[in-house]
Image: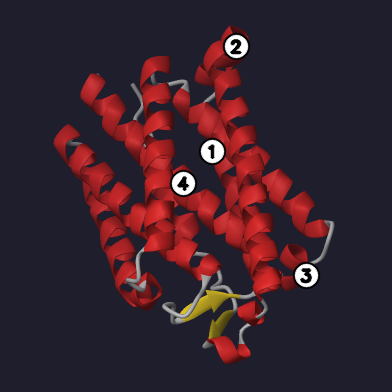
Amino acid sequence: MVHPEGAAAAAGDQQYGQAPPDYSYGLEDSGFSDAAIRRGFIRKVYLTLMIQLLATVGIICAFLYWDALWQWTRANNWFSYTMMAVVVVLILAMSCCDNLRRQVPLNFIALGLFTIAEGLMLGSVVVYFNAEAVLWAVGATALVSLSLSLFAVQTKWDFTRANGSLWVFAWTLFSFALLCAILRSQYLYILYACLGTLLFSLYLVFDTQLILGGKHRKYEVSPEEYVFAALNLYLDIVLMFFLLLQVIGLQSS
């Protein structure tokens, strides 16, 4: 069986290659000083995220339960790498071009194309796992994401100050992924997937607090960056799903 650790590592690079969003320091200069603007921003972000996740789950189910598509994908490995390249190009374009992620309707078109490409890439990976493992990974990802989002809202711990520490952790994990690819040990794969899940769990809390802002947060994301904020949350959840699927799939194999 082909393990998707390479795809997960490459997808993990998407998180690290993104341009940082515009930060605001303090509420006096923040676009969120108006509570109505802040609530509207949060609604836009989470509505966009929900649509992305529903579309992604639908694409994954098509790859799992449509036999002709399942067989074609397993017989054509180039499809996974092509979708991976498309995803990376779209992320770089949205990260580097302010107009592309801020100007309507270009931002929604770009985000829609990215979501479809990401869903196709995920679908091309899940065909190497049995349907039960994929569904368990989907359920675990949903539970963990909801729990961490509620924690990020309620806690007064400011994870936005930990940006540097998360960056170091991310590159350390990337180095560990290279070691796993060389040694090809199943136990190292499982350890790598567990550490990756922890990393992107922390990133999910971090990005959620950037979106919510408030007096207990040092940094906030600009209200104009709702598409980029939704993209960050989506990537955190997708990469967490990748790694949880790897843990569940390897333990059941």
Task: Kindly check if marks 3 and 1 are in contact, taking CB atoms under 8 A apart as contact.
Answer: no
Say whether disc 2 or disc 1 marks the residue closer to the N-terminus.
2
Q: Distance between the residues labelled 3 and 1?
A: 28 Å
Q: Mark 3 points at which residue?
A: 99
Q: Of circles 3 and 1, which is in front?
A: 3
Task: Kindly check if marks 2 and 1 are in contact, taking CB atoms under 8 A apart as contact.
Answer: no
Say whether disc 4 or disc 2 marks the residue closer to the N-terminus.
2
Q: Mark 2 points at which residue?
A: 66
Q: Distance between the residues labelled 4 and 3?
A: 25 Å
Judged from the image, the secondary structure of the residue bearing numbered disc 4 is helix
* Type of amino acid under label 1: Tyr
Residue drawn 44% across the image and 56% down it:
13
Say whether disc 2 or disc 3 marks the residue closer to the N-terminus.
2
Q: Distance between the residues labelled 2 and 3?
A: 38 Å
Task: Kindly check if marks 4 and 3 are in contact, taking CB atoms under 8 A apart as contact.
Answer: no
| Along the line of sight, the residue nearer the viewer: 112 or 17 | 112
Q: In which quarter of the image is residue 224?
A: bottom right
> In the rendered view, does 212 fall on the left or right side of 50?
left
* Type of amino acid under label 4: Ile
Is residue 93 at all visible to an observer of this figure? no
User: Where residue 33 sits: x, y (%)?
Assistant: 63, 82
For residue 46, above or below residue 229: above
Say whether disc 4 or disc 3 marks the residue closer to the N-terminus.
3
State the count of labels. 4
For residue 76, above or below residue 55: above
* Type of amino acid under label 2: Trp
Q: Of circles 4 and 2, which is in front?
A: 4
User: Where residue 26 sits: x, y (%)?
Assistant: 52, 88
| Along the line of sight, the residue nearer the viewer: 6 or 143 | 143
Judged from the image, the secondary structure of the residue bearing numbered disc 2 is loop
